[in-house]
Image (cartoon, rainbow, N blue to C red):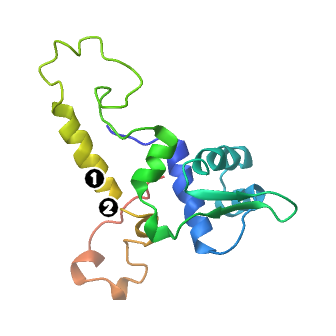
Amino acid sequence: MIRLSKLTDYAIVVLSEMARHTGVVHTVSVLAERTGVPAPTVAKLMKALTPAGLTTSQRGAAGGYALNRPADAISIAEIITALDGPIALTACVDGAESQCGVERLCPMRGGWEKVNRAIRDALEQVSLADMMTPILFPDPAAAPAHAVDAPAARPAH
């Protein structure tokens, strides 16, 4: 199973909350209160997201954090990379910190990069704004006939 870290999941929640209130400087405590993500975790996220260029920080009495770009200009790939490092299914990818012990002998050497690139490309096509748009129909009357009878999807977290 391919699974993102909890930090990445939390980052999408926190960044989505920030995107709902554009033009506002957000404090860690307010973001924690609004999202339910613990304040130490929000602080840790901001320390990773700011150097990655996704958020900006402002010091002082009116300080806090703001999105660096609109939600539709922030890709999910950027968020994942900021928190989890390069997007890859295997360690044998350019830029990976760990080296594979059998890399010289591996018949798949370089083949996994095609898969890694396809996943990275797909995640670059999904924006933070896309994640904020609900897929389910909150009003069953607004849903297509086939969607009303379908079982409800479970939330990701």
Amino acid type, residue under disc 2 in the picture: Gln
Image coordinates for residue 55, horizontal then vertical, percent: 61, 58
Pick the front one: 91 or 37: 91
**Where is 56 relative to 41, above or below?**
below
Q: Which residue is mark 2?
A: 125
Whether label 2 touches label 1, CB < 8 Å: yes
Which numbered tag is attached to residue 140? Answer: none
Q: Taking 152 as reference, is 38 above or below it? A: above
Answer with left or right where residue 112 lies relative to residue 22: left
Q: How many marks?
A: 2
Distance CA(mark 2)–CA(mark 1): 7 Å
Quarter of image, res 73: bottom left
Query: Disc 2 on helix, strand or loop?
Result: loop
Q: Callout 1: helix, strand or loop?
A: helix
Q: Residues within 10 Å of mark 1 (few under 14, many from 20)?
A: few
Residue at (52, 56) in percent of width and height: 12
Please state the horizontal and vertical placement of residue 151, each as a whole percent of the image: 31, 66
Name the residue tied to disc 1.
121
Q: Amino acid at mark 1?
A: Asp
Residue 57 occupies quadrant? bottom right
Residue at 40% of width from left, 58% of height from top?
154
